[in-house]
Amino acid sequence: MKSDAEIALHDLFTRGLAGDAVAYRAFLQKLSAHLRAYLGKRLFGWPDEVEDLVQECLLAMHNQRHTYQSDQPLTAWVHAIARYKMTDLLRAKSIREDLHDPLDDELLVFAASAIDASDARRDLAELLQSLPDNQRLPIVHVKIDGLSVAETSRLTGMSESAVKVGIHRGLKALAARLRDMP
Amino acid sequence: MKTDDLVALLATGIAPVQPHAARRRIGQAVLVGLPISVAILFLGYGVRDDLASAILLPMFWVKLLFPLCIAGAALVILHRLGRPGVRTGWTWMGLLLPIVAVWALALGHKLTGLLIDQIPVVQGVSWVTCVMSIGLISLPVLVATLRALRELAPTRPTLAGAAAGAMAGGVAAAVFALHCKELAPASLVIWHLIGMVIPTLAGALLGRRLLRW
């Protein structure tokens, strides 16, 4: 049986994938609360890492959102990515064996949610500044200032497709930098 | 940056996402890689001159279809491995069954005594060429497929790389079958299989390094 969270999140996400920004934002907000609870429980000994990993998962899920097919349980997709990112982190820390709770039960990923975010240790805004202009400017204008792709194109002198590519590559570069940070 | 700000950033200015990304990306990779593989065969090796009569031999078709079955199974597996949370399930059997089938065929030949005549051919110098050629011909498909996988989200990068290699190897062995005149089942089950295993191993090694995200 599908959980209520699965049904609600699936609906918001598929609307988001179709281009509905309001639904997509609501999806990401609910998702981050679920991820925070799920990861917080499993990274019990490393509370500082939780918010970083929540952000890393959100960025990864956004960048790879085209790999979701709507006939697939969203729980499985989210869990697989969260688990992949967590395993990556733990491998980097070589503390896999100390894991507080098993990673295996995917149904638990939407079991709880936690609204209160602690501060992330790694600052994405700072990382954003380190990107080259052709990636940073499209992200700043379109994703932060809320300008359209056409307006950003006029403002920066970049072509519209270069703006879109810049956003795509820039967000992937941010994800890669987050991953490789200690 | 606070998580809420990140959420706002990610949700601002989004465009609709085209469905079936995995299928499209992997399909495009094959469409890009396959013509180059075929070109390598035509320019570097040439198609066997007796193709018209060879197509009457059952073994020619076995040699063509066996690696295509492997490539097809690898394609199905790849389509699953590229997407998080999709289980591969029984699809691995698709790789195993064709191998079991050709081994059964080859052993059947051995029982009828035919293989004994073929042994000198199998041990001849052509096996190095055969294995190396399949490896070479597989490269365009392997590179294109690994590039496609980098745009997807394999949570098991080594396995995904191996599946990309198996698909590239299968395609290459089928392409090479248009050149190679060796029709002994033993050569197929040993050298063509090894020719496919090498790209698979290469794909696994490359996948482990290149497919992290």
Image (spheres, helix red, strand yellow):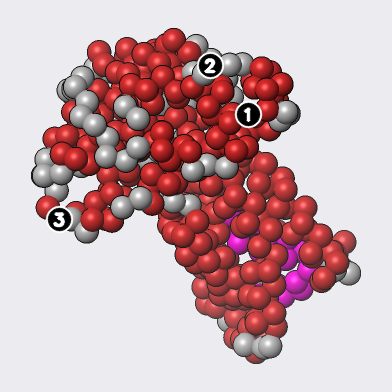
The answer to which of marks 1 and 2 sits earlier in the sequence is 2
Residue B18 in the image, given as x and y percentages of width and height:
59, 24
- Bin the neighbour count of mark 1 within 10 Å (Cα to Cα): few under 14, some 14-19, many 20 and up: many
- Circle 2 sits in a helix, a strand or a loop, which is it? loop
Quadrant in the picture for residue B17: top right
- Give the amino acid at mark 1: Lys
Residue A63 in the image, given as x and y percentages of width and height:
48, 33
Write down the residue under mark 1: A164
- Bin the neighbour count of mark 3 within 10 Å (Cα to Cα): few under 14, some 14-19, many 20 and up: few
Camera-near label (1 vs 2) is: 2
Q: Is residue B13 above or below residue B140?
A: above
Taking the magenta stretch, the answer to whether it contains residue B182 is: yes
- Bin the neighbour count of mark 2 within 10 Å (Cα to Cα): few under 14, some 14-19, many 20 and up: some
Write down the residue under mark 2: A146
Chain label for disc 2:
A
Decide if residue B46 is on the left or right side of residue A19: right
Residue A39 in the image, given as x and y percentages of width and height:
21, 35
Q: Is residue B65 above or below residue A44?
A: below
Q: Is residue A71 above or below residue A23?
A: below
Q: Are marks 1 and 3 on the same chain?
A: yes
User: Which residue is at the front of the view, B4 or B85?
Assistant: B4
The answer to which of marks 1 and 3 sits earlier in the sequence is 3
User: Which residue is at the front of the view, B60 or A154?
Assistant: A154
Image marks 3 and 2: residues in contact by CB distance under 8 Å:
no
